[in-house]
């Protein structure tokens, strides 16, 4: 007599260590194979876009810190670029360099968190994660020297940055840049050739390039599928046009490529930071703007950056008052999740955890 | 550098294909009629000189008199971008054709616009709330939304 089988629907999350926040997945399994996935969001929805309509332009900056709280510098940068476009403000050269430098440090920190938690999801408990966090901690210490905060930095301002780096920042940064290759090297040595990592990630969760483009995927996930598209190169902002760096790409678009592209990008970010230190010009760090900003009525602007997770954009509309009329946030984490179902159907539960980790989402940004 | 298409330039392309389309442009924005959204979207994606294969964002703004739904587009092939907008009148049941068929990446973004702004997308495969819970009264990003929850 044949055994009667039927698909089983299981809830994963919203509180589950592998969902990287409060994401809930309603997954239907046939045995161990996934036949349907539905992500359910909203557990961290704070209505940032609505809150922005009741705050002035500088206050909104603090809301952007809390979107992707692993990479607040790049959030600040995207917002500031949008407001500067709206007002038609020029940013002093030194401020642009400081922005690029801190954004790249933040990218390193964010990619390290992504890599560390991916390994945690693979079952490599604690040790690799601590290798990543050890490195990230040093970057956060530098942010503390810059602006007093480690996570919610609010370092950038429309028109420049909040303050110049203190004198003892530069030797500390040099020290980090001296240590960085070794810190990253140790991590690579431990993991990139690790048999378990290779078996669990290679050829798993393959995302073909045409699917990635159709699903509006951006950032390292898109690049891992083989397209060298980076907004820092395609449409340079601040002083990225003066920086020499390569765009690492993957060739298969599997979990391993997404992991490797991030590690390679950390190296490229180190190159950019070194160039910033070399080229750092003297001068003012902020354009003097009125205390309360009033962009012209009817102005609108779309400012975007290549955030660690993908294209982060702010679409701002002004009505001439002190608060934005509309502040729409294009969040890479939410949009990269659109492809989750395509990626997961046909794979097993254990692969689901790794694939979700390799997309690198941040729930603060998904839900806003 | 990504080249931003001027509305007028893009309008000429669309007029060649849809001679009876009502278009309006200003700077780098182009307005089309809401009922044409899907066919224009498909044309923008498939026309070899435009090839807008990447949908950056779907946004909506409440201008009280009407809702504006915008599509930020990029072509990876040509490295150019465009902003296509449409005005939807009426506050009761505003709706626009969905572009999920053209760019599947619009899926969650359209659900978000529906959830928070209350503009529906005809032909969307799964149009339901995404951030808020089913049964939430109203659409909070509308300008006339008043908080209905008592604390």
Image: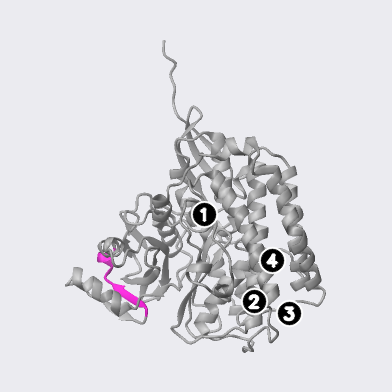
Give residue A279's quadrant in the image.
bottom right
Measuring from the top left, give residue B126's x and y in whole percent: 38, 49
Instruction: Identify the subunit bearing mark 3.
Output: A
Q: Which label's residue is closer to the chain start, 2 or 3? A: 2
Q: Which residues are magenta?
A: B28-37
- Name the residue located 51 percent from the left edge and 33 percent from the top edge: A348
- The residue at which mark 2 appears reads as A97
Q: Nearer the viewer, residue B47 or B143?
A: B47
Q: Which residue is mark 3?
A: A164
Query: In the image, is A201 to the left or to the right of A335?
Result: right
As drawn, A177 above or below A29 = below
Q: Are marks 3 and 1 in contact (CB under 8 Å)?
A: no
* Quadrant of the drawing holding the N terminus of chain A: top left
Observer-side mark, 2 or 1, equals 1
Work out which quarter of the rendered image holds the C terminus of chain A and state it: bottom right
For label 1, the residue is: A249
Mark-to-mark CA distance, 2 and 1 = 26 Å
Q: Which residue, as the protein is rendered here, is positioned at the far left?
A: B20
Label 2 – label 3 distance at C-alpha: 11 Å
Q: Secondary structure at mark 4?
A: loop
First reached walking from the N terminus: tag 1 or tag 4: 4
Q: Which mark is residue A152?
A: 4
Q: Residues within 10 Å of mark 3 (few under 14, many from 20)?
A: some
């Amino acid at each position: 007599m044949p055994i009667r089988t039927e698909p089983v629907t299981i809830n994963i999350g919203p509180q589950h260590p592998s969902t990287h926040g409060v994401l809930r997945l309603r997954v239907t399994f046939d045995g161990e194979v996934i036949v349907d996935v539905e992500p359910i969001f909203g557990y961290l929805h704070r209505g940032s876009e609505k809150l922005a309509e009741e705050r002035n332009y500088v206050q909104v900056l603090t809301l952007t810190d809390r979107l992707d709280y692993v990479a607040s510098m790049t959030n600040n940068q995207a917002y500031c670029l949008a407001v500067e476009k709206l007002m038609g403000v020029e940013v002093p050269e030194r401020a642009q360099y400081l922005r690029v430098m801190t954004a790249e440090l933040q990218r390193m920190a964010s990619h390290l968190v992504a890599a560390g938690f991916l390994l945690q999801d693979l079952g490599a408990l604690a040790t690799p994660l601590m290798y990543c966090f050890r490195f990230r901690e040093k970057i956060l210490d530098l942010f503390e020297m810059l602006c007093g905060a480690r996570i919610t930095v609010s370092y950038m301002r429309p028109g420049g940055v909040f303050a110049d780096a203190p004198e003892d920042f530069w030797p500390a940064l040099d020290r980090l840049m001296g240590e960085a290759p070794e810190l990253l090297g140790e991590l690579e040595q431990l993991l990139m050739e690790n048999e378990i990592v290779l078996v669990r990630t290679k050829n798993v969760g393959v995302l073909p390039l045409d699917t990635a483009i159709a699903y509006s995927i951006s950032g390292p996930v898109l690049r891992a599928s083989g397209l060298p598209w980076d907004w820092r190169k395609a449409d340079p902002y601040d002083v990225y046009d003066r920086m020499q760096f390569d765009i690492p790409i993957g060739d298969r678009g599997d979990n391993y490529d997404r992991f490797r592209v991030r590690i390679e990008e950390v190296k490229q970010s180190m190159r950019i930071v070194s160039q910033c230190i070399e080229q750092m010009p003297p001068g003012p760090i902020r354009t003097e703007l009125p205390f309360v900003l009033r962009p012209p009525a009817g102005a609108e602007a779309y400012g975007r950056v290549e955030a660690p997770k993908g294209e982060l954009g702010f679409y701002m509309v002004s009505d001439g008052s002190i608060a934005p009329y509309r502040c729409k946030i294009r969040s890479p984490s939410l949009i990269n999740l659109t492809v989750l179902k395509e990626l997961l159907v046909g794979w097993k539960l254990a692969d689901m955890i790794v694939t979700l980790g390799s997309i690198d989402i941040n729930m603060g940004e998904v839900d806003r | 550098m990504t080249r931003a298409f001027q509305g007028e330039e893009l309008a000429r392309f669309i007029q060649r294909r849809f001679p009876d389309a009502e278009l309006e442009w200003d700077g780098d924005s182009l307005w089309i009629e809401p009922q044409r959204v899907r066919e224009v979207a498909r044309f923008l994606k498939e026309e070899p000189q435009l090839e807008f294969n990447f949908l950056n964002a779907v946004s909506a703004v409440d201008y009280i008199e009407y809702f504006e739904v915008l599509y930020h587009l990029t072509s990876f092939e040509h490295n150019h971008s465009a902003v296509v907008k449409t005005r939807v009148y009426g506050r009761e049941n505003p709706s626009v054709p969905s572009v999920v068929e053209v760019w599947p990446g619009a899926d969650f973004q359209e659900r978000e616009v529906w959830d928070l702004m209350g503009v529906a997308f005809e032909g969307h495969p799964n149009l339901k709330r995404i951030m808020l819970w089913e049964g939430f009264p109203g659409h909070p990003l509308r300008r006339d939304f008043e908080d209905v929850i008592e604390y």
